[in-house]
Image: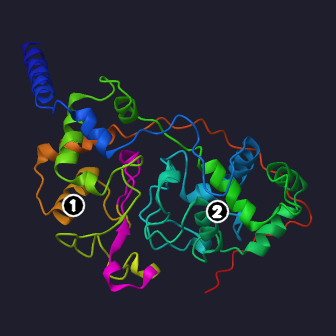
Amino acid sequence: MKAILISLAACLVTTAACADSLPANLRQMALDNFKPLPSTVPAVHDNPITPEKIALGKALFFDPRLSASGVFSCNSCHNLATGGDDNLETSIGHGWQKGPRNAPTALNAVFNEAQFWDGRAEDLKAQAKGPVQAGVEMANTPMQVVTTLNSMPQYVGWFRTAFPKDADPVTFDNMAKAIEAFEATLLTPAPFDAYLNGDDDAMSAEQKQGMALFIEKGCSACHNGINVGGTGYYPFGLVEKPGAEVLPENDKGRFSVTHTADDSYVFRAAPLRNVAVTAPYFHSGKVWNLKQAVGIMGTAQLGEELNSQEVDQIVAFLDSLTGRMPDVALPLLPPETETTPRPDGAVRK
């Protein structure tokens, strides 16, 4: 009992000391670097969001028939039950092929300035088209997708309702717009947001200390804004290049998009919301431990060896970014008909 009381007292002293060492203007420091999630679904460019479009996008997000094999859906790699990703080093796709990069979370992805690690898709509707057509992912074609959707009368009706002004609403573009509308609803308000909005008790003293350290060390220079990242492109290894076990030499990041030498090993800053539940980390998916990932970022991006206390505090802050998942019930999908294309598992190079 005495040992428990001593331990409790030590804990209280540590907490008090942590609170006493916090900057007096911490919330303003935070607001200068970050923004809370909005309370409503954000607008997206050239795609008015309606309840009908969201409902259609939700069905499409979960429908494996968008893939050639009839096996893989958007949710396969961006599983909403496991943090919006698949918790794999790299995703498994068509013909059980392994993809080249770790799947980012779909949660709050609407706030990223561009999609994919190299930013090759300007928004979520552009992103939605990529995996459907990628041979290593869903391996389908726009024409086959439209044929599949048109073969199911219920889908045709849903498209007409979601896109009432279109003479021919069942299109590959509209499929992508509907998925974007649904993904725009995948917001996860967190204790971090409550603190930014004025609730002093929403974050613990250690989490606040970690946030102050995150800002003071310069982490927020890249990981800022609503998504605590997701904007800007930076070299991985700004100060010290990680080894090939973390930074594979054959993946040069944004260089594959711009073909500019300066973009070699440059990647979009990772959004950090829900990072505590989206291991493994980095585009390579080679690091499974969040403390290890923070340590690597310290040496690679800051040129600084963070001590164990600093790592623990920053990880505590990152825990405050774990938000409340939206309620998402599995949709009942339209039944197939005689004209629905049959699954095709052939791998084509």
Q: Is residue 106 visible?
A: no
Q: Secondary structure at mark 1?
A: helix
4 is higher (above) or lower (below) than 266 = above
Q: Residue at x 38, y 84 (%)?
A: 260
Mark 1, other Cα within 10 Å: few <14 / some 14–19 / many ≥20 = many
| Residue 329 relative to residue 12: left or right | right
Q: Residue at x 36, y 35 (%)?
A: 192
Mark 2, other Cα within 10 Å: few <14 / some 14–19 / many ≥20 = many
Q: Residue at x 30, y 73 (%)?
A: 247
Q: Which quadrant holds the C terminus?
A: bottom right
Q: Is residue 266 visible?
A: yes
Q: Nearer the viewer, mark 1 or mark 2?
A: 1
Measure the C-alpha gap from mark 1 to mark 2.
33 Å
217 is higher (above) or lower (below) than 15 = below
Residue 74 x, y percent position in the rendering:
62, 58
Picture disc at residue 296 = 1
